[in-house]
Image: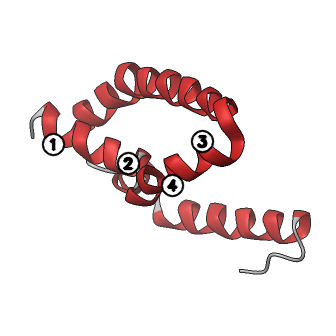
Amino acid sequence: MSIVPLGVALMVSFVSAISILGISSEIYTYGMQFVMYYNGMIMATLVVSYVYLPVFFKLNTMSVYEVNNSLYCRHCVVVYVCECQRFFARCFPSARL
């Protein structure tokens, strides 16, 4: 697997079509404050490209789910997801899953 498909897969998970279509309305509504969002996206892209991308490339995986399945046992992942759901249910009782 080359670096280009991996980079495209990670980019697609960052930028969705809805965010691209909604940018103009966000800028119209909130003005230049929305630029701060893009400053954060630039920093996040740099972190991903220099920290996460080499790790994904060395592990020969395309997603975080593949990394979780290869590094942790399935039972640990299921317990973690259940605990996260319980935590969010306690913190945000009106938002039921």
Element marked by disc 1: helix
> Would you identify the image quadrant in which residue 27 lies?
top right
| Among the two numbered marks 1 and 4 on one chain, the one whose residue lies closer to the N terminus | 1
| Among the two numbered marks 3 and 1 on one chain, the one whose residue lies closer to the N terminus | 1
Closer to the camera: disc 1 or disc 4? 4
The residue carrying pointer 2 sits among few (fewer than 14), some (14 to 19) or many (20 or more) residues within 10 Å by Cα, namely some
Give the label on residue 67, or none. Answer: 2
Q: Is residue 78 above or below residue 10?
A: below
| Among the two numbered marks 2 and 3 on one chain, the one whose residue lies closer to the N terminus | 3
Element marked by disc 3: helix
Identify residue for label 3.
27
Does residue 44 appear left or right of residue 5 in this picture?
Answer: right
Task: Name the residue nearer the viewer: 13 or 38.
Answer: 38
Element marked by disc 4: helix
Does residue 53 appear left or right of residue 51 in this picture?
Answer: left
Task: Name the residue nearer the viewer: 10 or 85.
Answer: 10
Q: In this orientation, does residue 61 appear? A: no
In percent of the image, x 27 and y 47: which residue is there?
Answer: 9
| Among the two numbered marks 1 and 2 on one chain, the one whose residue lies closer to the N terminus | 1
Give the label on residue 5, or none. Answer: 1
